[in-house]
Amino acid sequence: MNINNPTADQETHFFSDVCKNFDHAAQFTKHDAGLLDQIKSCNSVYRFRFPIRKGNSFEVIDAWRVEHSHHQSPTKGGIRYSEMVNEDEVMALAALMTYKCAIVNVPFGGAKGGIKINPKSYSVGELENITRRYTVELIKKNFIGPSIDVPAPDYGSGEREMGWIADTYATMNPGQLDALGAVTGKPISLHGIAGRREATGRGVAIAVRECVSVGEDMQKIGLTAGLSGKKVIVQGLGNVGYYSAKFLSEFGAVIVGLCEFEGAIYNEDGLDVEAVFQHRKSTGSILGYAGAKQEFKNTMDGLEQPCDILVPAALENQITAQNIGSIKAKIIAEGANGPTSPEAEEAFYKAGGMIIPDMYANAGGVTVSYFEWLKNLSHVAFGRINRRFEENSNLNLVNMVEGITGVPLTPIQRATIVKGASELELVNSGLEDTMIRSYHEIREIYKSNPAIGTLRNAAMVGAINKIAVSYQNLGVWP
Ligand code: GLU
């Protein structure tokens, strides 16, 4: 899909691209062909249509929910609200969710939903009707529930929509104690979790920071180790792109380019992400931002400007055989799902680059969704029970050390040491730990056999092995 011209091509190769990646990686595993086929297939594809009232007339909406793999329950994945959504895309995204969850050790199968609308063409009331009706259709077919299938936000949806889903599900299941665990990415006031909104972007930034911290790998692609001063271009200023850019710049990178569907801006000395975001919010366009040295009407031109790291965080199929030769970055970090075509990936590695693959790079969202689901099932916010206890223990320790050494701490030092962890701090630390450990798991596989060739293959090999073990544990396969 071309972000500039979304109606141009209704391509249907995304799921087969994901399967190609799977088949390629499967060669490096030792599993039975039947088991591999079971892992790869989409288990359940539910396509449905429902009417909604729009003004004085009715409109029929196309929608999907795909549960790719039931090796773990519940299945998990976002709901995409987009005019361009189609069955192939939802299947591909559901499959990516399965592999993504396995890679970051989140105990869910993969799923994805799609509602074929342009949310901007509907009033808030109409969007609420569509979302609630979509939820009812899922309930009717047992395609939603805290132990069945748990939706979340995706492109075109957010906390507001998840709130409507939670309310509809809870209303239709009176007395179900865990009803709020039927959807994640909810507003905090509706039992969502601190840090979920930023989680995918924060995860992308941690993934990039971890990747560039490995000197040996950076040397091979002609970069120095460390994020400080690295030049980054980000495509997409939606939830994932905005937070990726924000945290990357907080971690020391320089955001030199930002691209949106209306165009791109560039400044080799750096752009102020927050100021660009506010400029776009008030003018409706990324173009015209005073701090940019160059502007491009075509978002694709923005991707091709000089940088060390490119973060495509918009839609799939943005980097293809056609434009890969013009990409100057040495690292592509896939914030979006499926932004790089298999042909482009091959060419990029041949030219000495490396790609941090989507199924790992953007797994921060589902990781924190997992924490939210745990919070909903346990009916208590993280930190609530132990925080004060922790603070009292820390206080006793600080008083004791001060007493023994006779050296008093400053009030700021004292407050920092004594303070118990908040929910946000716990979530962020769990996310960071997950992203760092998973990166090194993937890297170990990548290094174990040069024929594996790419981090995507390595991530997929790891995912296949973990899913195979789940099937074996279920007693389904010997
Ligand atoms: N839509 C997000 C993704 O693609 C989040 C999924 C979730 O939190 O379940 O990873």
Image: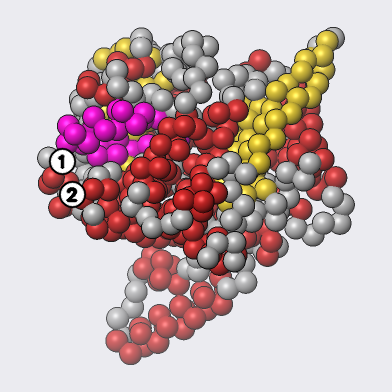
User: Which residue is found at the position 29% from the left and 86% from the top?
Assistant: 405
Q: Label 1: which residue?
A: 221
| The stretch drawn in magenta includes residue 332 | yes
Q: Amino acid at mark 2?
A: Asp
The colour mode here is secondary structure
Q: Amino acid at mark 1?
A: Ile
Q: Label 2: which residue?
A: 217
User: Which residue is found at the position 32% from the left and 12% from the top?
Assistant: 296
Q: Is residue 426 above or below residue 298?
A: below
Asked if disc 2 and disc 1 are in contact, CB closer than 8 Å, the reply is: yes
Q: Specify few, some or many for label 1: CA neighbours under 10 Å numbering under 14, 14-19, or 20 or more.
A: some
Magenta highlight range: 330-355
Q: Is residue 87 above or below residue 286?
A: below
CA gap, disc 2 and disc 1: 7 Å
Of the pair 133 and 204, the residue shown nearer to us: 133
The image shows a total of numbered marks equal to: 2
| The stretch drawn in magenta includes residue 159 | no
User: Which residue is found at the position 27% from the left and 52% from the top?
Assistant: 446
x, y (%) of residue 430?
46, 60
Residue extending farthest bottom: 404
Q: Is mark 1 within 8 Å of ligand 1?
A: no
